[in-house]
Amino acid sequence: MAGNFQDDDREEAMRNLFNLYKDENEGRDGVDAHLELDGRAVPFELKTTSKGSVTTVRDFGPDHINKWRDKHWLIGFFIDGREFYHYGSPSMMSEWINSKADYISPDFMLADLASQNLTLNDMHQVMEPKALYSYEDAKALQKMQYKKDKYIALQDRDGGYSPERMLEIFKDRSKYLIERGSTLNNPHIPFTYFRGWVEITDNHAEVLRAMVREYFAQNENYVF
């Protein structure tokens, strides 16, 4: 498997090599791969690198922390003509994930506190005071952050929103904007993080299954 594939091609090649599968019903944003093992479907995050450090995601925030909480990782390394893989269990990855969670936590707490303290007077500095706000008013404020069905569901008056409900949307917009500035831009996992980890170089599917079985045998009650 060459190391210059596009991401989708690399992931598909890894799924084939390790006998994993992707649930196509989950769509593009679903779990990268599942491993069928002893009656359970084990979720996997797939990554590859040709530079040593491993890129993750843009706008890393609490959603990614929650998404990765129970994930197993499979990382392909293509370095200096060598090809090998590391398996990372949830407990093995937790140190790195928790360090990033601790780093961004104060900023997200600040976003919540700042947005919840906004008042109608604050909102009227941004929006014209009205007795009834329209769908267009709400969308002009929150833009594409909500889908149409959510905008409709939030209406608490016939044909629109009370000032109090619009204030809730206003607070949510403020919180979203502050949180966007608090996310991390593609934090890398350094190559040194994997020092001492087993390199999978052959019998890929068999070795991976043995490692995952060992993890479950030793960490059945593991809490992230």
Image: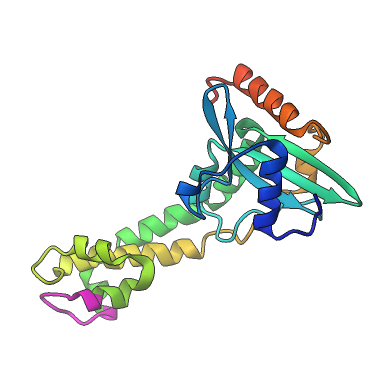
Q: Main secondary structure of the magenta part?
A: loop
Residue 193 spot, x, y in % from top left = 75, 41
| Total numbered badges shown on the rendered structure | 0
Let me know if residue 105 appears in the view: no
- Residue depicted at 33% across the width and 62% down the height: 172
**Nearer to me, 121 or 67:** 67
Residues drawn in magenta: 125-137
Picture residue at 25% right of the left edge, 66% below the top: 151
Relative image position of residue 12 (x, y in whole percent): 66, 49
Question: Of all residues shown, which one is farthest toward the right?
Answer: 80
Could you say which is closer to the camera, residue 110 or residue 57? 57
Percent position of residue 118, x then y? 29, 65
Is-magenta flag for residue 106? Answer: no
Q: Is residue 148 above or below residue 13?
A: below
On the picture, is 119 further left or further right than 20? left
Residue positioned most to the left: 158
67 or 76, nearer to the observer: 76
The quadrant in which residue 150 appears is: bottom left
Residue 221 seen in this snapshot:
yes
Is 179 positioned to the left or the right of 92 in the image?
left
Residue 88 occupies which quadrant of the picture? Answer: top right
- Considering every residue shown, the one lying at the far top of the view is 217
Report the side of 202 relative to 61 (left or right).
right
User: In the rendered image of this protein, does residue 220 appear above or below residue 7?
Assistant: above
User: Residue at position x 17%, y 79% from top?
Assistant: 129
User: Which quadrant, please, contains the C terminus?
Assistant: top right
Residue 129 is covered by the magenta coloring:
yes
The residue sitting at the bottom extreme is 128
**Could you say where residue 131 lies in the image, as x and y percent from the top left?**
10, 75
Which color mode does the image show?
rainbow
| Quarter of the rendering containing residue 125 | bottom left
